[in-house]
């Protein structure tokens, strides 16, 4: 998905070229077909090839993935995920300072229409 988001769209060959790992063409094709089956990407014919485009944006995909992780591994408690990251030292002191600033920042007031 990262490659498709970065490129905007791509054929199997184009996506394969951008991947950090040297995956077989058929492996990349299978992954893209699975993503299409799950409605994450859209496929259009382009000559003999197919061009794949993302159907979901990066932020939406992240929200969905994090929600599944929180529900599955942390019993629906996002604070447990953050606590785990802090206790596991996965967050640097700078990261924790950023989190504190976000938490302490006043919430924006909703705009009137």
Image (spheres, helix red, strand yellow):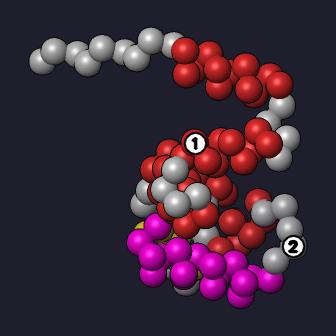
Read off the magenta span. Answer: 24-40
Chief secondary structure of the magenta portion? helix
- Residue 22: give its label: 2
Give the mark count.
2
Does dot 2 land on a helix, a strand or a loop?
loop
Q: Vertically, is 66 above or below 111?
A: below
Q: In this view, does 1 lie to the left or right of 92?
A: left
Left or right, 20 with respect to 71, comes to: right
Label 2: few (<14), some or many (≥20) within 10 Å? few
**Residue 83 highlighted magenta (yes or no):** no
Q: Measured from the top left, where is residue 14 in percent x and y?
A: 69, 65
- Left or right side of 75 for 11: right
Residue at (62%, 16%) from the top-left corner?
101
User: Comparing marks 1 and 2, which lies closer to the viewer?
Assistant: 1
What residue sits 74% from the left and 44% below the top?
A: 85
Which mark is on residue 79? Answer: 1
- Labels 1 and 2: the sequence-earlier one: 2
Image-quadrant location for residue 93 = top right
For the point 82% across and 77% down, the residue is 23
């Amino acid at each position: 998905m990262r490659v498709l988001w970065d490129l905007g769209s791509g054929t199997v060959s184009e996506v394969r070229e951008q991947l950090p790992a040297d995956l077989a063409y058929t492996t990349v094709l299978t992954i893209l077909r699975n993503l299409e089956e799950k409605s994450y990407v859209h496929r259009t014919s382009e000559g003999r090839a197919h061009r794949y485009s993302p159907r979901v944006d990066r932020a939406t995909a992240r929200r969905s993935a994090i929600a599944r992780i929180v529900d599955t591994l942390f019993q629906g408690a996002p604070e447990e995920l953050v606590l785990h990251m802090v206790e596991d030292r996965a967050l640097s002191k700078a990261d924790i300072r950023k989190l504190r600033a976000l938490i302490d920042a006043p919430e924006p007031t909703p705009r009137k229409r």
